[in-house]
């Protein structure tokens, strides 16, 4: 008996198929039971869907009781998340079927038992969504006029991309997805190493990455071929196809977490504002996909409840009132209930504009500028000051469930490697809503470098709770020649109590990102009179 790769792979796949079948039997009452018992509820079966020569995608389908050629049902296609098999959605798919939907879930190309290679939402992956629709129309009593997609993470992005290519899709619910892949992996021209590494490891463990994916990782980690990297990511960005999505007219629901460390919120808000179709935007506390995970396990869940209401209204015509709610629904990070707004821009009613060095926004500690110079003492690079955005998943999970954001002692931050500015005490509670902007002049000792800006809520003991942050990387600058840097920090909703201060901290190292500071380089920050530095904090 040969012990080569092919038999071994077949053995692994056979065992996984058994595991999936057992899980389905446990999670879906009636699977494997007598036909008489199964007839009362939705019918369930595993299916193989050929999508290209030699490429078969593994799927499962629920068909509601009573659906037939004379009584066609709306169909929802659910592409699985990155590194997840199609059984991921079995609980939610069953609920959809019990509510009259045909629910077709599938494992994306290149993962687990599905054929092909991982293309990272490339053209073949997007076309696969349409091929699954074709299969549903040919093999189930699906209504061709009522087609939707629902997905988490990778599945969310695939659904949005498909909506720009297939006009048959009438409704999309994209949960913890992305709009701009460039912004996701390279915001502030800075590589997001923890998120990219996590996705890469998961991809290689659970699937078969394509050569193109491998080249992307090399380019990403080395900052080689940046124009090619950006072009590759643009092809995989729903924002690239915004005009097509608007022209096709699907109703689009977007739901993400404030602390999503893979797909940060700014890109989704910008994408939402440019949509001209029926639309809804939801942001909640948490990290990537953490708001949706309880619902995948069958627990009560706001995201999935709203998703079903969105589908019911736009695919079944149910007058459930979701179209009359304010379409932007947000939940503050630490405490408080949902707030509704007519548009994203309505979150911000005013802005707290503070000039670095002004009264009420004073520099603290030994880095206060020399009289008349307007410049901080240069800070050293390549050493973490202690101010950072945390660890993907873990940090924001702690905040989501324990209401504890990342914290530092602002007075104890080492001023040799961190520049710190601090406001006067706030006379009243400040409700931060939206995107904080920073404009600052930088004097580098090298042509390339990275810094990270953090905004903290500081209490009377000097303990700072992280409100928001953003990295910034520069290349091709002249050493010793100042330049102005503009960056938008991550959008957020955070309530700063009266009597607290705001603190701006800038350092050069954060475990979330790859920094580009040469050894022994320094950065100084200033506010020239001709071009003052400032920070603008959005308030409700």
Image: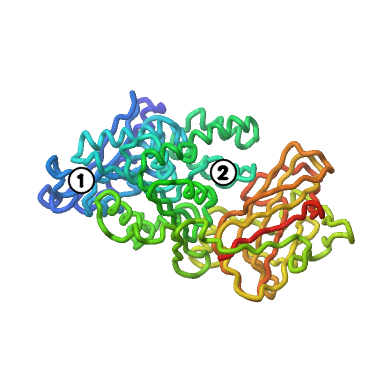
Q: Position of residue 69 (x, y in %)?
A: 14, 40
Instruction: In the displayed orientation, state which residue is furthest to the top.
Output: 53
Q: On screen, 58 above or below 427?
A: above
Say which residue label 2 marks. Answer: 183
Name the side, left or right, on which 509 lies relative to 325.
right
The answer to which of marks 2 and 1 sits earlier in the sequence is 1
**So how many labels did they put on this image?**
2
Q: Position of residue 165 (x, y in %)?
A: 38, 34
Q: Identify the mark at residue 275; answer none if there is no mark.
A: none
Instruction: In the displayed orientation, state which residue is furthest to the left.
Output: 36
Label 2: few (<14), some (14–19) or many (≥20) C-alpha neighbours in 10 Å: many
Q: Position of residue 320 (x, y in %)?
A: 28, 60
Name the side, left or right, on which 297 lies relative to 337.
left
Q: Residue at x 53, y 63 (%)?
A: 399
Nearer-the-camera pick, 301 or 267: 267
Say which residue label 1 marks. Answer: 73
Q: Residue at x 45, y 69 (%)?
A: 337
Disc 2 versus disc 1: distance between alpha carbons? 38 Å
Q: On screen, 344 above or below 112?
A: below
């Amino acid at each position: 008996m040969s012990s080569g790769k092919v038999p071994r792979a077949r053995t692994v796949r056979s065992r996984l198929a058994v595991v999936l079948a057992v899980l389905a039997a446990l999670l879906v009452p009636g699977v494997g039971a007598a036909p008489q018992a199964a007839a009362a509820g939705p019918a369930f079966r595993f299916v193989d869907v050929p999508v290209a020569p030699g490429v078969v995608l593994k799927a499962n389908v629920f068909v509601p009781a009573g659906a037939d050629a004379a009584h066609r049902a709306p169909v929802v296609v659910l592409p699985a998340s990155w590194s997840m098999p199609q059984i991921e959605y079995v609980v939610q798919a069953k609920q959809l079927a019990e509510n009259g939907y045909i629910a077709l879930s599938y494992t994306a190309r290149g993962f687990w038992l599905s054929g092909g290679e991982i293309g990272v939402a490339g053209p073949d992956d997007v076309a696969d969504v349409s091929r699954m629709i074709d299969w549903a129309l040919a093999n189930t009593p699906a209504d061709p006029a009522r087609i939707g997609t629902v997905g988490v993470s990778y599945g969310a992005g695939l659904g949005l991309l498909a909506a720009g290519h297939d006009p048959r899709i009438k409704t999309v619910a994209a949960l913890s997805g992305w709009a701009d892949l460039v912004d996701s992996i390279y915001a502030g021209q800075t590589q997001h190493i923890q998120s990219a590494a996590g996705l890469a490891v998961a991809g290689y463990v659970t699937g078969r990455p394509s050569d193109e994916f491998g080249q992307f990782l090399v380019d990403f980690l080395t900052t080689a071929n940046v124009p090619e990297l950006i072009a590759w990511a643009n092809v995989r960005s729903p924002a690239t196809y915004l005009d097509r999505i608007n022209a096709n007219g699907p109703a689009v629901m977007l739901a993400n977490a404030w602390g999503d460390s893979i797909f940060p919120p700014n890109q989704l808000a910008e994408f939402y504002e440019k949509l001209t179709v029926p639309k809804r935007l939801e942001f909640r506390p948490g990290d990537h996909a953490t708001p949706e995970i309880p619902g995948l396990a069958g627990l009560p869940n706001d995201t999935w409840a709203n998703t079903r209401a969105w589908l019911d209204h736009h695919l079944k015509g149910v007058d459930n009132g979701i179209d009359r709610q304010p379409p932007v629904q947000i939940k503050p990070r630490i405490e408080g209930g949902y707030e509704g707004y007519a548009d994203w821009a309505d979150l911000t009613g005013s802005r707290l504009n503070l000039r670095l060095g002004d009264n009420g926004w004073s520099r603290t500690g030994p880095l206060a500028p020399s009289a008349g110079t307007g410049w901080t003492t240069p800070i050293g690079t390549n050493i973490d000051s202690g101010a950072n955005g945390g660890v993907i998943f873990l940090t924001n999970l702690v905040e989501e469930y324990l209401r504890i954001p990342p914290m530092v002692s602002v007075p104890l931050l080492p001023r040799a490697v961190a520049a710190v500015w601090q406001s006067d005490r706030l006379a009243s509670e400040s409700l931060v809503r939206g995107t904080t902007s920073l404009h600052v002049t930088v004097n580098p000792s090298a042509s390339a470098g990275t810094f990270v800006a953090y905004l903290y809520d500081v209490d009377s003991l000097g303990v700072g709770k992280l409100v928001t942050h953003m990295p910034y990387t520069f290349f091709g600058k002249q050493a010793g020649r100042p330049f102005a840097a503009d960056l938008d920090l991550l959008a957020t909703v955070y309530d700063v109590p009266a009597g607290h201060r705001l603190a701006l901290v800038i350092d050069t190292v954060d475990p979330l990102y790859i920094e580009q500071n040469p050894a022994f380089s320094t950065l100084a920050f200033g506010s020239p009179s001709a071009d003052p530095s400032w920070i603008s904090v959005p308030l409700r």
